[in-house]
Every structure is written in structure tokens, then in C-alpha cells.
Amino acid sequence: MDSKDSLMSLLKTFKKWFRAIFIVCSIAVVGTIIISLMMDNYYKASTTFYAASSDLAKPAPIGGLEIDIEYYGRDEDIDRLLSIANSGEVATRLIDEYKLAEHYEIKNETQKGKYRVLEKFYKLYSAQKNKYDAIEISMEDTDPEQARDIANRARDLVNEIAQRTVKSSQQLQIDKYKKNIDRKTTELDSLTSKIERVKERYEIFDSRNQGEALTQALAEARSPDQIRVIEGKISEFAKGVSKVVVMEQEQREFGLQLSLDKERYKQLLSAKESDFKAVHLIESADIPMVKSRPRRSILVIAAGLVSLFFCLLAAVVVEKVRSINWKAL
């Protein structure tokens, strides 16, 4: 019975305040309609792409070995592209290229002005991973064509900066191999000169076959003078041949390693000069045909409901306060 009386009391209160509630809610709804009509229409354009694997930027292994290449990037590749997409460099370049400070009517001559432009930009720009593990870059603007252009340009900048980062790492490797090649070439020239000096000193012209040739010449010698001369040559050959063999083996190993380094150096240069893609485009941004906001109908309905709630609450509170016997307190 108490709950029924309370409900009836509320209904009586609302009926009593109906005119005032209606006027206030009408004002709120009409005001929201007017304000919403004055608000600019924003259009959102989005482009979607997958991260390319960093394996695509690596040169093939020497020797023609087959390797499994991942074409789509792993989590670290996705995170790297997201970091680039949300970097200050991308934001600054987009703001400068599209003169967004003028477009947003913000003076950016001061540090505070530049901050306000960036703040406004990041409210309209987003780069995030969607549920399919693809990266989606979105841009809102009052000009639908500009929204499309900025979204696509942002994707191109992500690709460009990612390529630059990889190429910078490749250049460090190229410089490293170049230094190693120069050093090994100098060492190989020095070793070659040393071998030539040792050969000249011990009269060695063929470390592999000269010993056999001298032995055969000794067997064929007839005069004592010939035998003495050949024995002297054999003695000198025996003193220096072991040194020459060791140095020639070192020379061959040096030459082989130098050849491998030169081949790797050429591959790195070729990889650096190649135009690899850091992103796999799924969908370019198109001109949005429908505005993304404001949702005027939702704003009007929300304003009406909120104003109705507070009006009803105010009516109940006022009636409750009036019902209190203040003199008896």
C-alpha cells in the first residue's frame, strides 16, 4: 500500500510540474538542435594494411641455399609500424604538408600553438591494430577529400620511414663489410709480398712440384759440379718450402674469406638499392560519402532524456522540501 501511495504521489508531482518540465525539456531539445546544426560535419577515411616481414629486406644467403621467407610481419613488425604511425615525425610532416594549423585556424608560431595543433590533430587521427591483426589508419576532417588524402599519405609515410630505418641498418652493415674488405685486402697484399720475398730468398718458384723436379735433376746429374749445385738448391728449397706452404695456405684461406665478404658486400648493396615494401596494402582510403559525426539525432535524444531526468528529480526534491514542516524542526 505504501509503495502504491508513493507511486501515486510521484505521478501527482510530475503532473503538477508537467508544464514546467515540458518547457525545460523543449528548451533543451531545441537548444541542442540549434547547437548541433551549427557544428561542422566530420568525415572519416581509413586505410588498412598488413606489416611486411623484415625478411623481405634481407639479401639471399650466399651459395644459393633455399630459405623459408615470411611475407607477413610478426608481432614485432606490427609494433614497429604502429610506433612509426603514432610518432611525432608522421604527425609533424602531415601537419606541415597539409597546412593543418591554418586549416584548424590555430596560430602555431609559439610552442603552445604548436602543441594545440598536435593536440587537435591527434583527436582526429588514429593508428591502431584491428581484430584481424591489420593496421588501420583513420583520419577525420571536415573536408572528405582531405581526410582521404591524409590517411593515405600517413600510410605512405609509415612505409617510407620503415624503409629508411631498415636501409640505415643496412648501411651500417655495408660500412662494416667495406672496412673488413679494405683491411683484409691490405693484409692479403702484405702476405703476398712476404711470400714473394721468401720465395726469392730460397729460390722457390713452385712449392708443390719444385722438390720433385730437383730430385729428378739430381738423379740425372753426371758431373760433380752439377750434383753440388743441385744439392745446394735442394738444401735451400728444404729450408724455405715449409714456410712458403704455410703462408700459401693462409693466403688461400684469406682469399676465400675475402671473396665471401665481397660477395656479401655486393648483396647488401643490392638489397639496400632495391625497393622493398614495408607494408602490404589491403585497402586504400576512399572519399567518405557519409559523415562520421556529429550524430545529431543521438545528441537531441540524449539532451531530451538528460533534461527530463533532472527535471523530474528537481520536481521531486522541490515537493519534498515543501512538504517539510520547518517550524516544527
Image (cartoon, rainbow, N blue to C red):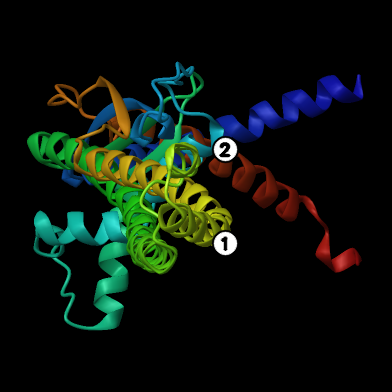
Kindly identify the amino acid type of the residue bearing the numbered disc 1. Lys
Number of other residues with Cα within 10 Å of mark 1, as a class: few under 14, some 14 to 19, many 20 or more: few
Q: Is residue 33 visible?
A: no
Mark 2 = which residue?
A: 309
Which residue is painted at 20% across and 24% down in the image? 284
Report helix, strand or loop for mark 1.
Answer: helix
Left or right, 151 with respect to 138, comes to left
Q: Please state the horizontal and vertical placement of residue 119, each as a whole percent of the image.
A: 34, 62
Q: Nearer the viewer, residue 199 or 157?
A: 199
Q: State if disc 1 and disc 2 touch (CB < 8 Å).
A: no
> Residue 95: x percent and y percent?
18, 59
Where residue 151 appears, as percent x and y from the top left, is 22, 38
Decide which of 185, 57 is in the foreground and name it. 185
Q: Secondary structure at mark 2?
A: helix
User: Which residue corresponds to the image point at 86% horizontal and 23% vertical from the top-left?
Assistant: 3
Q: Which mark is residue 239?
A: 1
Q: Is residue 69 visible?
A: yes
Q: Residue at x 49, y 44 (%)?
A: 211
Judge left or right: residue 16 versus residue 1: left
The foreground one among 311 and 280 is 280
Q: Residue at x 38, y 66 (%)?
A: 183
Q: Quarter-wise, where is residue 180 in the image?
A: bottom left
- Relative to 165, residue 280 above or below: above
